Each structure stands twice: as structure tokens, then as C-alpha cells.
Image: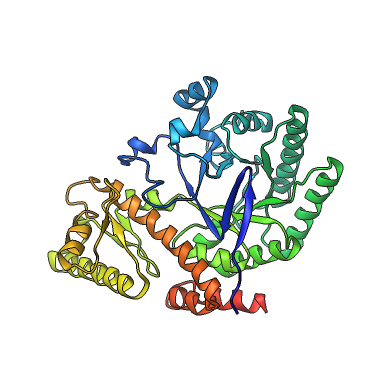
Amino acid sequence: MAAPLRNIHIGPHSLRVPALFASYRLGDFPTSGLKKFPWGMTQTEAILINAYDFTQRKYKLALSNGWDPERYLKFKDRPILIDSGAYYFRKDPRISVTPSDILDIEIRSQADVGVVLDHPFPPEAPDKAARISTTIRNTESMLKRLQELGGEMTLMPVIHGHDPKTIKNCIGRLRKLADRYHAPLLDHVGIGSLAPLAQRGDAKLAVEVVHAVRTELPDSQIHCFSMGSGLLMLLAYFSGADTVDSQSWIVSAGFKLAQLPGHYVMRMGKREFNDESKFRAAMTRFRARMAKLADEEGFSVKDWLTGTKLDLTDRATRVRYVESLVDLKSNEHVHNRACHNLWTYNFEVRQYRAAMQRGCLEDFLFSRLAATRYGSAFEHAKTLRL
């Protein structure tokens, strides 16, 4: 059955969902190989930045002198989400940051939504309950402080839990905070601690978590943190998420990986192959997949320095394009791969939306996921939706 697309409101912006937030670490342009900001060329609709980056000297100074997203990120009139940086702060030897510190950074960043300083955990953590309680305390602290300041930024609480009972309890505690402070705290929520599940091969449990949150909060705008690989994000949307974020578009590019719709990433470094013939065969497969996608789904690519669209029906163009993704020396083409990956992710979001409108979403997802490691998780997600 065809389904109408929804728009959600993030600050003053309207965003069609499902949607992708491109996760960007301040300084990736140019220190990580980006040669320019990729947002316009790749049709990126929303970005996620990180509060942790503003504790570094350069950006701390910029924040003090009046941070302007248009000036520093070349991103204007589109949604910006700022993560609390909890993962990065907890990698430090000692944690000196407070929820109030994070809120101050988030407000001054001019982001539309600020994420609560949460305490994520891996599946085997023995102190999950304590970490959830820390997250709830931080939520109350930041909500109270935001109201005292009269701030207009939306605060996003983070739900943690790897079973329905824990999730329901976590949401119940957030509901009590919302009532106590007369705040729309559950209008926008995030789901944390999912990435470790997917990374360890338990995508079915990740699907169950997202579905459980959607069941408890049918009208909320739900964001899944770090579920943004080219395949995982499709599962997240199907399970109930409105938005996901991804940093893998640039991280994987640094590891010489390039993504195509419906496929795993392919390594684009000549030195990574045992011999010349294997390398040539891999690049031939990549070109053939691009040509097939162009013919069947209208997939296209661009010159990632000029933004000029390229004709994938031309074999010579395909050859030159693939060469522009391959590193023969070190990481000379990170920029091209990063833009290619982000473009691919955004293409997949558009394809998902189109499949919804045509009423063939499950067929589309079957074509993307059935032959991958996430095939059984997709079948599981289908049963949960019945």
C-alpha cells in the first residue's frame, strides 16, 4: 500500500522523513582530506555536529567570538543537530565536562536540536541501570537549566535499553520529567547504544529496540544514533526511525572504501589487492554495478570538485570516474570517495521515499537487504510490523 511522506519540524525547518543527518567532525575540511564542503553537491539535507569539538582550542575560540554555521560550515537554512559528545568525553582519562557545560556549547552552536549528555553502553556492560540513571539525571539538569535560561533550542533526550522492559522504564522516567517541567520532552527523542549491537552482529536486537521505542512513542520524532551505514539505515527506517546519522561516509573513505546502493563497500586502494588481475576485476565489478544502477534506477555521479553531473552510460566516463576514487599512492582521493559515499547514502534515502510512495517498500528493501548479512534482520522487522 502506498504511504504518504511525512514532514517533521526541527526548529524553523521542515524535513521530509525518513532523512539522514550527515555527521561532521569540525576540521574534517581540510584536515581529513575534504577539499571543500560537500553539502550542496551531495544534496545533503541535514547535518550533525559534535559538542566535543568545541572544547578544542580553535573552535572554543570561534564559539566565544560568535559561532556562525553559515560561515564555518557553509550550511544555511537546513537542520543542524548537535550531539553531546558523550562517547568522546568518556575516552578522556577524566571527565570534567558537566551537563551545564554541554548545554552552553549546544546553545551557542546555534544548532536546532541539542542532545542530552547521555551515558551509552555496550551490550555486555554490567552497570547499564546506573548509566541509564546518569542519563536521566543529566536530562533533568539540562532541561531545568534550559528553562532557566529561556532558551528556544529543542533538547533531545536519549533512550537506552536492550530489552522492552528497560526501554519502557526509561521512557516512563522521561515522561515524569516532561510532566514535572511542563515540557514537550518526548517530541524529539534519540535512541542510543545501538551501534555496538549492529557492529557485533545482533541487528535483530537493534531492530527490536527501535520498534519498541516506536511502539511506546507512536507520535514522536525518533532519531537513531550511529545506524547510518548504507544498509543499516534502511533497517532503522523500516523499524520506526525517522532519522539516522552517519559518519561512515567520510570515515570509510579514509579507509579507501566506496559504497554503492544495495552493496557492501568496496576497497579502492590498488595496494590492498594481491595482484593486478584481482584489482582490475574488482574495479570492473564496481563499474558494472554503477552502470546497472544507472540503467535501472537512474543512479548518477558527479565530478566532486565541480559538482558537474557525469554520464554513466558512457564507458570511458565510468572508467575515469572509478579511477578518481582509487588511491594509487596514499589517500589522495579521500575527498572523492567521501562525496561519493555521502551522495550514495542520500540517493538511498530518496529511493526509500520513492518506494514508500509507490507502495512497494518491502520489495525495495528485499532487493537491498535480502542477500546481505541483514537479510534475516529485515525478515524479523517485517514480523514486528504485522
Q: Nearer the viewer, residue 348 or 55?
A: 348
Q: Percent x, y for residue 59?
A: 47, 27
Depicted 255 relative to depicted 355: above or below: above
Residue furthest right in the image: 180
Q: Nearer the viewer, residue 52 or 124?
A: 52
| Residue in the image at 40% along x and 47% along y | 40
| Residue in the image at 58% along x and 69% along y | 238
Q: Is residue 178 left or right of residue 377?
A: right
The answer to whether residue 202 is visible is no
Depicted 354 relative to depicted 229: above or below: below
Tally the numbered discs: 0
Q: Percent x, y for residue 111?
A: 58, 37
Q: Percent x, y for residue 355?
A: 50, 73
Q: Nearer the viewer, residue 250 or 183?
A: 183
Color encoding of the figure? rainbow
In the rendered image, which quarter contains the N terminus?
A: bottom right
Q: Is residue 383 left or right of residue 374?
A: right
Q: Percent x, y for residue 126?
A: 67, 52
In the rendered image, which quarter contains the C terminus?
A: bottom right
The answer to whether residue 171 is visible is yes
